Each structure stands twice: as structure tokens, then as C-alpha cells.
Image (cartoon, helix red, strand yellow):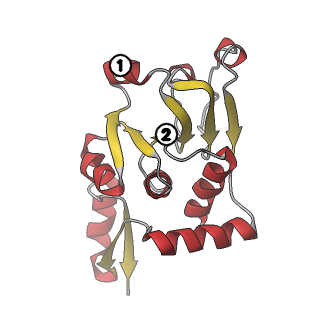
Amino acid sequence: MSSGLTVFAGINRAQLPPGSQVAVLGAGGLGHLAIQFLHKMGHAVTALSQSPSKQALIGRLGGRFVISEEVAQLTELRGTIDFMLSTLNVPFDLDAHLRLLKPHGQLCLVAAPNEPLALSGGLLNNSRRAIYGNYIGSRAETEAMLQFAAANGIEGVVEVAPLAAVNEAIHRVRTRAVEMCLVLKT
């Protein structure tokens, strides 16, 4: 619920008009929920991920997959995005991603990279692009998120395995052989 609320509140703060061009950086625990929310809100979603194995999942959730290190695809997206939500907790090229935003475009950070990000201030000055952060939401946003998720069939991608398979489960998580999330059940 916390992951859903974090991205939902960050998205709502953007006050996007219907049919906006949006991008999600990272298609993990936060990102896969953001893709669903944005898609069900009627936006055109591009998901940038460095994991080609997530292409099918992103498509099922309503997004278009782009490999985040693919320079040609990033160049093609330059100046086309109204709103970008970053779920990355690893360093990334902030300037390259800001260039994807249209003038007045917004970047919302809902995860904190573990190292400082470099920023060329000129990418904000003339374009009036904005960067903001969001960590969680209010009680009212929680209710709105839950109602929206229920009405639109949004749910986490979770695989359930028996507790007896804990060793195999740990191995699968460590080797990234789990599509999104693995829960052990007794």
C-alpha cells in the first residue's frame, strides 16, 4: 500500500491534463504500480528500464518499453514528455532524462538515489521544467488511491510460493528470476 500511495500522490501533485505523455524510470516495486496508475488515468506511458526481461510485463501493465541506456531511443524521446516519475534508487544521468521533458515538464522523484545526482541548472532555467520529490501521501490520498485502484483493477504483481520453498525462493530473488515480487505463504 505504501508503494502505491507514494507514486499515486506524486502523480496527483503533477495535475496532468488527460492524455499526457508520461515516463516512468524503473519498472520495479514502485514503477510497476506507477505504470498502471498512469495508464488507467488515460496517459500515454513510456517505461524506461535497463531490464529487457521486463518488456512483456510493462506491455501488460499498459506501458511502452524503452531500454534506458539506448541512446537512440532516448534521443527520439527528447522534448516529448510532460511528466516523468523516477523510482530509481541508483545513480542515473539526470541531465539526459531532463532533456526528455517538454518545456514546463515535471520530474517527480519518489526514490532517493544512493549517490548525489549532477544537475545542469540551464536545463531548468529556460524551459521552466520542475523537479520535486514525494515520499508518501495523506489519509485523503490513501482513500483516493484505494478507490482508484479498486475501480480500475490495479494491483501489485506478486508471485506466491510456499514457505517450504524458502531456499529456492531466496535463490530466485538473488538471481533476479522473479518477475516482480515474491511472497512466502505458510
Q: Residue 110 in the image: x percent, y percent?
A: 61, 47
* Labels 2 and 1 touching (C-beta < 8 A): no
The local secondary structure at tag 2 comes to strand
Q: Are there few (<14), some (14-19), or many (20+) residues within 10 Å of tag 2?
A: many
Q: Amino acid at mark 1?
A: Val
Q: Residue 67 in the image: x percent, y percent?
A: 33, 33
Foreground: 121 or 42? 42
The residue furthest front is 18
In this view, 179 is above or below 95 = below
The local secondary structure at tag 1 comes to helix
Find residue 54 and name its label: none
Which residue position holds label 2?
22
User: Quadrant of residue 1 in the image?
Assistant: bottom right
Which residue position holds label 1?
71
Q: Amino acid at mark 2?
A: Val
Which of the two discs, 2 and 1, sits closer to the camera? 2
| Quadrant in the picture for the C terminus | bottom left
Residue under the image location 61 percent in, 35 percent down: 107
Residue under the image location 36 percent in, 59 percent down: 180
Q: Residue 5 in the image: x percent, y percent?
A: 61, 62
In this view, 37 is above or below 94 = below
State how far apart marks 2 and 1 are (Cα). 18 Å
